Image (tube, rainbow, N blue to C red):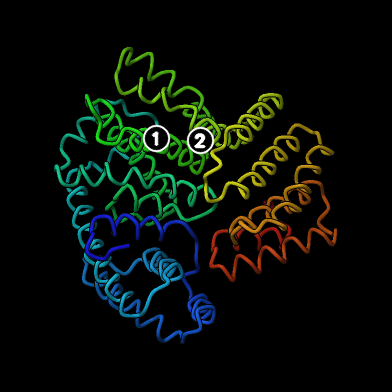
């Protein structure tokens, strides 16, 4: 990675930082320092140029931003001097990103956020996008290429703030619900950005724009699920492309989307399965078909391909549980737990989630006194706390206390 290629460096650094989930607390910094064989004072010293740059902006230091930098440190294999140079470049990129965010904030109507949940039409999206300055518009189009990493982060239990970073959101939102509503709004703008790129006669990077289109679609569904709008999430994944085809017959961009659709069939099938099992009523045969499609067509090049397969077993197990097929549900959860325990590719978040979902299944069966239930909750809680997975640790404490999953 050459330091003089600033634009490429910004993209690579940001993408690398978003790939994992590391804690925000002082103990996690000490744990990292111990793994790397350096003092935690050295780690804080390396972070200082970045934290000072953020403090100069017109908002307080964001713990999420600090988490990204901590993860970035863990992925660097270079000297402290090289790391310092890297952070200087990263700081300049962060400053530019925040300038773009503030510019976009002046142009976007924040009052439309809640309305968008109920379906603001494309004309409003186009009017909003047309007012965004050209430089900021390029930031949107560049940002959609990172959406896959952030969607993975969000969907596996990370803070919705990650999706906001990629969408370059500048609103000072406070509650998690506001953040998710905002992410939903920006997913629509990311879809519009991808549409505009694909509508060009010769798109500069057709495959990347198609990826951004699908990822923004998935991001909208995930945000709707987080808001509890499960039917809307299912409709988004089930019917969005069909409605697009009806409204835009002969559109050049949609022809390109369809040409690449097989590459995303596995990811979309897993998303649809997650949305399906949250509906009050669903057919278990449809869940099995989505499971089969996800297994057969999941892209094998994904960094978390194998762990994702074990999480897929949990998704089907949940479908069996809700449809009353308890023996089949138990088989899926047991297989997922055994598989994720043996997996070398699994990160802390994967290990926590499989244990958490298995424990939730045991809770639903009324087996809260079972030693396995206590073991799963204990192991997952320890992992979540050590890894800084705040949301998951909270859910596990609720499980340990005997409240609903």
Q: Is residue 31 left or right of residue 219?
A: right
For residue 397, side relative to residue 136 (left or right)? right
The residue shown at (47%, 38%) is 224
- CB atoms of marks 1 and 2 within 8 Å: yes
Q: Residue at x 18, y 43 (%)?
A: 107
**x%, y% of residue 235?**
50, 26
- Work out whether 77 lies above or below 154: below
Residue hosting label 2: 229
Q: Position of residue 248 (x, y in %)?
A: 32, 16
**Residue 195 placement, left or right of 23:** left
Q: Identify which residue is drawn at 64% across, 46% down.
A: 311
The residue singled out by tag 1 in the image is: 117
Q: Residue at x 26, y 62 (%)?
A: 94
Instruction: Tell me residue 229's x, y (percent).
Output: 50, 35
- Helix or strand or loop: what does disc 1 sit on? helix
- Looking at the picture, tell me which residue is in the foreground, 224 or 132: 132
């Amino acid at each position: 990675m050459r330091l003089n290629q600033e634009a490429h460096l910004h993209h690579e650094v940001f993408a690398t930082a978003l790939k994992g989930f590391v804690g925000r607390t002082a103990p996690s910094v000490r744990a990292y320092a111990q793994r790397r064989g350096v003092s935690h004072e050295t780690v804080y010293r390396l972070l200082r140029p970045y934290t000072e740059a953020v403090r100069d902006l017109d908002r307080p230091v964001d713990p999420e931003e600090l988490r990204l930098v901590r993860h970035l440190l863990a992925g660097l294999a270079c000297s402290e001097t090289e790391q310092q140079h890297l952070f200087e470049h990263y700081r300049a990129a962060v400053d530019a990103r925040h300038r773009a965010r503030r510019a976009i904030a002046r142009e976007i109507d924040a009052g439309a956020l809640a309305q968008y949940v109920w379906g603001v039409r494309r004309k409003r999206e186009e009017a909003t996008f047309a007012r965004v300055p050209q430089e900021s518009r390029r930031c949107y189009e560049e940002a959609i290429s990172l959406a896959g990493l952030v969607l993975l982060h969000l969907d596996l239990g990370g803070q919705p703030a990650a999706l906001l970073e990629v969408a370059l959101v500048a609103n000072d939102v406070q509650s998690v619900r506001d953040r998710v509503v905002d992410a939903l709004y920006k997913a629509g703008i990311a879809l519009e950005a991808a549409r505009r790129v694909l509508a060009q006669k010769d798109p500069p990077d057709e495959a990347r724009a198609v990826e951004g289109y699908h990822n923004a679609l998935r991001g909208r569904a995930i945000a709707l699920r987080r808001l509890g709008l499960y039917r809307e999430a299912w409709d988004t994944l089930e019917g969005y492309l069909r409605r697009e085809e009806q409204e835009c017959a002969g559109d050049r961009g949609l022809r390109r989307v369809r040409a690449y659709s097989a590459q995303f069939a596995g990811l979309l099938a897993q998303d649809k399965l997650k949305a399906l099992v949250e509906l009050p009523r669903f057919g278990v045969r449809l869940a099995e078909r989505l499971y089969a499609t996800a297994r057969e067509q999941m892209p094998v090049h994904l960094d978390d391909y194998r762990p994702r397969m074990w999480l897929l077993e949990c998704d089907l197990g949940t479908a069996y549980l809700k449809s009353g097929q308890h023996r089949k549900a138990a088989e899926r959860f047991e297989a997922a737990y055994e598989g994720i325990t043996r997996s070398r590719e699994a990160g802390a978040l994967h290990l926590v989630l499989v244990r958490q979902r298995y424990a939730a299944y045991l809770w639903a069966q009324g087996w809260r006194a079972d030693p396995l239930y206590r073991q799963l909750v204990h192991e997952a809680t320890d992992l979540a706390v050590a890894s800084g997975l705040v949301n998951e640790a909270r859910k596990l404490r609720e499980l340990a206390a005997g409240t609903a999953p």
